[in-house]
């Protein structure tokens, strides 16, 4: 259905496509660079250290090659999939990105509206620049991403607010309990949160504001991260969240097994887009051993480096049930607001469907989808 454009394009132009934006999503980044302030662009595009892992994330997609199959006879392609107990229309979600207001005045609201129109699930960041309640009003299917704060009562408050606002699953990000060495941001002396840009979701919280005193930004800095957490603390999440839980930032097979042992419902294999540990393994290279070890016991999701439908299919072939995409839709937002996010989703979904079909697959779980070469 996403790829049903061959008539559409000649008759009416593509639905959801912004004609002035490229349909090759890798071309959005340089356009966003022209439009955004240096600080905002660097914050989004930048990575940790030398950028080695961010580059390696993309290289890993180049190394893994699809092997298209012929005469498969599928007249349609079913993209629907089931993740964390929910049926998704396609194996793609909008991953959590903080501070979206620095890219467009409508920030997370525009993303939520685009996701709602496309029926795609949005994963809202704790570091959102609109409150989770405001976003919930604009959003369709929605999950909540938790940055687990260093304050038990605030964590409980976030979870209760998210539940009350209809977020159905929890994605707990483990890899960013402090920010990494990020040279662009250091050189620009820029951290949006210290300018109050991504803190609205905190400022609006009753537990946060009761304790914030007259310097809420300092208060935010004191409780954002929680480096003391261990696997034993996951019990706390189960006590305060009764829906499905996925752990984001898993790169190691043993950690994936521990997530299973802790009774988690999912993991997101991710290195945070190369923004945390420079030198870390490419996320796509971390995926096969993890899906091999735990793929039948827990839902394995993936992010870090998805830029095209072909990339989505490669991640599926390596065992991911669904992928999250981040920077491409942030650039779409920066360039054209809600319409720009829809543009990114439409391109990604249509190309995913076409890649599957032209490779001989009629759905996202086809056994022959596993055929893939790793070219070293
Ligand atoms: C500007 C920016 C802000 C982000 N903020 C968050 C966040 O608030 N929470 C989170 O879990 N991940 C955050 N991430 C990480 C993304 O969710 C994702 O893991 C990463 O960007 C990899 O995907 P990509 O290659 O599609 O960008 C952020 C990424 C970017 C680029
Ligand atoms: C305070 C960190 C939140 C944003 C984030 O995850 C990122 O910039 O990568």
Image: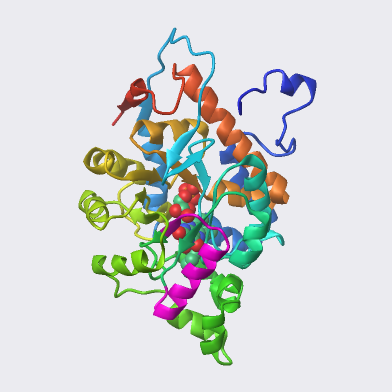
The residue positioned farthest toward the top in the image shown = 71
Task: State the residue at coordinates (44%, 74%).
Answer: 156
Q: Say whether residue 344 is magenta.
A: no
Question: Can residue 36 be spotted in the picture?
Answer: no
Would residue 154 be found to the left or right of residue 336 on screen?
left
Above or below, 162 relative to 346 = below
Is 157 within the magenta? yes
- How far from the left and from the top, in percent, is residue 197? 61, 72
The structure residue drawn at horizontal position 49% and vertical position 74%, both measured from the top left corner, is 157
Question: Residue 104 in the image: x percent, y percent?
Answer: 69, 59
Q: Quadrant of residue 361?
A: top left
Task: Classify 210 as above or below 41.
Answer: below
Q: Is residue 226 visible?
A: yes
Locate the C terminus by quadrant.
top left
Q: Residue at x 53, y 72 (%)?
A: 191
Instruction: Count the numbered circles shown.
Output: 0
Q: Position of residue 256 (x, y in %)?
A: 26, 51
Nearer-the-camera pick, 258 or 174: 258
Percent x, y of residue 354: 54, 23
Please tell me which residue is depicted at 56% across the width and 35% down the height of the picture.
348
Choose between 52 and 254: the one closer to the eye. 254
Residue 4 location, quadrant: top right
The image shows residue 289, relative to residue 241, as above or below, that is above
- Horizontal side, residue 101 vs residue 251: left or right: right
Question: Where does the magenta region start and end?
Answer: 149-171
Q: How is the image coloured?
A: rainbow
Asked where in the image residue 25 lies, by quadrant, the reply is top right
Quarter of the image with the N terminus in it: top right
């Amino acid at each position: 259905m996403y790829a049903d454009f061959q008539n559409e394009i000649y008759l009416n132009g593509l639905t959801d496509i912004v004609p002035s934006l490229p349909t090759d999503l890798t071309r959005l980044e340089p356009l966003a660079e022209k439009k955004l302030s240096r600080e905002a662009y660097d914050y989004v595009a930048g990575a940790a250290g030398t950028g080695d892992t961010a580059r390696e994330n993309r290289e890993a997609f180049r190394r893994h090659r699809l092997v298209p199959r012929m005469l498969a006879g599928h007249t349609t392609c079913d993209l629907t999939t089931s993740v964390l107990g929910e049926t998704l229309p396609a194996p793609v979600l909008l991953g959590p990105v903080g501070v979206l207001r620095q890219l467009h005045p409508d920030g997370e609201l525009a993303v939520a509206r685009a996701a709602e129109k496309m029926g795609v699930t949005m994963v809202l960041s704790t570091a959102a620049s609109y409150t989770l309640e405001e976003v919930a009003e604009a959003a369709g299917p929605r999950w909540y991403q938790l940055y687990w704060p260093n304050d038990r009562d605030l964590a409980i408050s976030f979870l209760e607010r998210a539940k009350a606002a209809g977020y159905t699953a929890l994605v707990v990000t483990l890899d960013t309990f402090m920010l990494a060495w990020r040279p662009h941001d250091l050189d620009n002396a820029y951290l949006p949160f210290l300018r109050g840009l991504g803190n609205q979701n905190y400022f609006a919280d009753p537990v946060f504001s009761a304790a914030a005193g007259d310097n809420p930004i300092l208060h935010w800095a004191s409780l954002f991260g929680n480096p003391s957490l261990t696997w034993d603390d996951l019990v706390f999440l189960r006590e305060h969240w009764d829906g499905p839980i996925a752990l984001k930032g898993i790169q190691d097979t043993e950690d994936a097994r521990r997530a299973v042992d802790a009774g988690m419902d999912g993991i997101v294999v991710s290195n945070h887009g190369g923004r945390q540990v420079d030198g870390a393994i490419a996320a796509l290279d971390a995926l096969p051993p993890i899906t091999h070890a735990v793929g039948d016991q827990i839902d394995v999701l993936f992010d870090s480096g998805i830029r095209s439908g072909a990339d989505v299919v490669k991640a599926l072939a390596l065992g991911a049930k669904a992928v999250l995409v981040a920077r491409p839709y942030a650039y779409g937002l920066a360039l054209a607001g809600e319409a720009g996010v829809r543009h990114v989703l439409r391109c990604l979904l249509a190309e995913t469907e076409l890649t599957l079909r032209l490779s001989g697959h009629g759905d996202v779980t086809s056994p022959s989808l596993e055929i893939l070469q790793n070219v070293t």
